[in-house]
Every structure is written in C-alpha cells, then in structure tokens.
Amino acid sequence: MARITGSAYTSHVPAMGVAMDLDKTEEDYWVPLFEGVKPAREWMADNTPDVVVLVFNDHANAFSLEMVPTFALGMGAEYSPADEGWGARPVPKVEGHPELSAHIAHSVIQQDFDLTMVHEIDVDHGCTVPLSMFFGQPEEWPCKVIPLLVNVVLYPIPSGKRCLELGKAIRRAIDTFDEDLDVQVWGTGGMSHQLQGPRGGLINAEFDHAFLEQMITDPEACAQIPHVDYVREAGSEGIEMVMWLIARGAMGDLHGGAEPIERHRLYHVPASNTAVGQLILEEG
Ligand code: DHB
Ligand code: FE
C-alpha cells in the first residue's frame, strides 16, 4: 500500500526561485537562507518520496477572477512551469501521477470534500519554488507531484479547520491506495507577509514562531485561528499559512499513530520583503 512518510512546509517566495535560477545563492543577501536550507535538502535526499502532494495557491496565473475553485486537484500526467510575466522558470516539467490523483479524488470526494478536478494547468512559483528549495536544481524532479491548489486569494477562503480536515481525508485516501509508494504532503506559502499597501513588508516573527510551534504540537487548536488573526498579525498574504494545515492533517498522530519527528525548522528574514519559514516532520 501507499504510505505517508512525512510532511514538509515552506514559504514559496518567488525571489528565492530567482536567486537559484540566476545563480545568486552565494551572494551575501542569500547565503544565510540557503545555508539554512541545507539540512532540509539532505533529509530530502535521504528520504526522497515517490510522490509529493504539493499544496499551494495559484497567484492569478492559471486561474483568474472568472473561476476560483476552493480546492482543486491536479489530475494530469505533467504540468509546465507557468509564465508569470517574465518567462517560465528554467526548471523541469512537473510529472504527475494520474492514477493516485484519480484515487485521491474518488476517496476525498466520497469523504464529502468537493474537489475541483483540473486536468491541465501550468504551475506557478507556489509549486516550483518549494521543489527548488527542497531538491535544488536537478535535470528532472526526483519524484512525481500531485498539485493541490487552494484558494487563499479571493474571499471567502477555506478555514484552517477545513484545511486540517482535508489533510486528514487525503491521508485516508493515500492509506488505501494499492501501490507501494512513499508519499509526502507539502504545505507551502507564508510566513508573515503583506505585499502591498501601508503595511507592506510587515513581519511578525513572534506570531510566525508561535504558529510553527502550535501547528506541530496542537494542530487542532492551531486550526481554530480565525482568518482575521492571520491577516491582522501576519499580513494579508500571511493567510497562505492555512495551507500548511492540510499537510499537518495528513500526519499519523492525528490518525491514531505516533507523534511526528521534527527533522528541520528554519525561520529567516528577509526574502524579498517577507519572512521565510520551513519545517519537516517525519512520520513517527
Ligand atoms: C511574494 C509572493 C508570494 O506569492 C509569496 O507567497 C511571498 C512573497 C513576493 O512577491 O515577494
Ligand atoms: Fe504566495
């Protein structure tokens, strides 16, 4: 059977992708961040999954105001990096796993989640920057990827509680897929950031650290944080953090298993005008 081996979490700041694409990671500005990422890359190299369910939001690149699905699951065999206005990132195509996608869609919809099924979509920095952060710059990505897109752009957006419950449903789906696969669920976005307006550049390290800690140790309480708290405390785009709860919901301790093992935690400011957070939880 397929099994969840861990979950990983990372901000997806596009400037981090640009730093890698333009070979700037050795520059003074970027060295502390990319030094900090090394333990995550080592863990990923030792624990490379067969498939990642990669939770992210499209930033009005594939979707527009014409259609805004709350939860959209990639069903395809491959996904191209999106052109976000300055050409597509020079990174490999993302290979999908249509059979596992079909199984997740079937199982999760039967568990009463109304997923939108997306057969063709280009994936933006929300998807490709996390892949680069954890895998570096390979010729091909070392695993297959199932994109799970969450609307955190246009209100109303799903609650933390709904996200945690969706993660649990995904866990139950993966646990019942009859193929020998190691699967990870990744949550992306966050931490503190507000990209526009008078509060642009807002960083609230205290909130970010408290979120990281509570999400690990008491995810059910963390899932109760209302949207207005994220936005007030961590900025308008800080709300992306609700997506981390989907990955957390897939961990075994919420399904009668052992507590996860924390393998990596990073908090760094600044990248662009935002904070970067990362976490890796291995199945206990
Ligand atoms: C930026 C964009 C993002 O989508 C994000 O999550 C963080 C930062 C940016 O444009 O700097
Ligand atoms: Fe984002």
Image (cartoon, grey):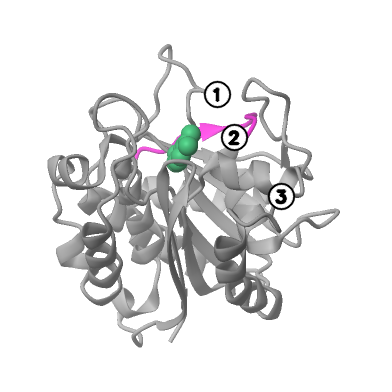
- Residue at the image point whose x is 69% and y is 62% from the top: 135
Q: Position of residue 269 (x, y in %)?
A: 42, 55
- Residue at the image point whose x is 32% and y is 36% from the top: 194
* Marks 2 and 1, the one that precedes in the sequence: 1
- Asked if disc 2 and disc 1 are in contact, CB closer than 8 Å, the reply is yes
Instruction: Write down the quadrant of residue 235 in the picture.
Output: top left
Tag 3, which secondary structure? loop
State the residue in front, 200 or 181.
200
- Residue at the image point whose x is 70% and y is 35% from the top: 81
Task: Give how far apart the Cα atoms at labels 2 and 1 are.
Answer: 7 Å
Residue 57 visible? no
* Marks 2 and 3, the one that precedes in the sequence: 3
Q: Residues within 10 Å of mark 1 (few under 14, many from 20)?
A: some
Q: Residues within 10 Å of mark 3 (few under 14, many from 20)?
A: some
Q: Is residue 190 magenta?
A: no
- Asked if disc 3 and disc 1 are in contact, CB closer than 8 Å, the reply is no
Q: Is residue 120 magenta?
A: yes
Which quadrant of the rendered structure holds the N terminus? Answer: bottom right
Task: Name the kind of residue labelled 1 in the image.
Answer: Asn
Ligand 2: image quarter:
top left
Whether 216 is drawn above or below 256: the answer is above
Residue wearing tag 2 = 124
Residue wearing tag 3 = 24
Main SS class of the magenta portion in the image: loop
Task: Give how far apart the Cα atoms at labels 2 and 3 are.
Answer: 21 Å
Residue at the outermost front position? 28
Task: Name the kind of residue labelled 2 in the image.
Answer: Asp
Residue stretch in magenta: 114-124
State the residue in front, 227 or 207.
207
Residue wearing tag 1 = 61
Task: Give how far apart the Cα atoms at labels 3 and 1 are.
Answer: 25 Å
Q: Position of residue 175 (x, y in %)?
A: 49, 70
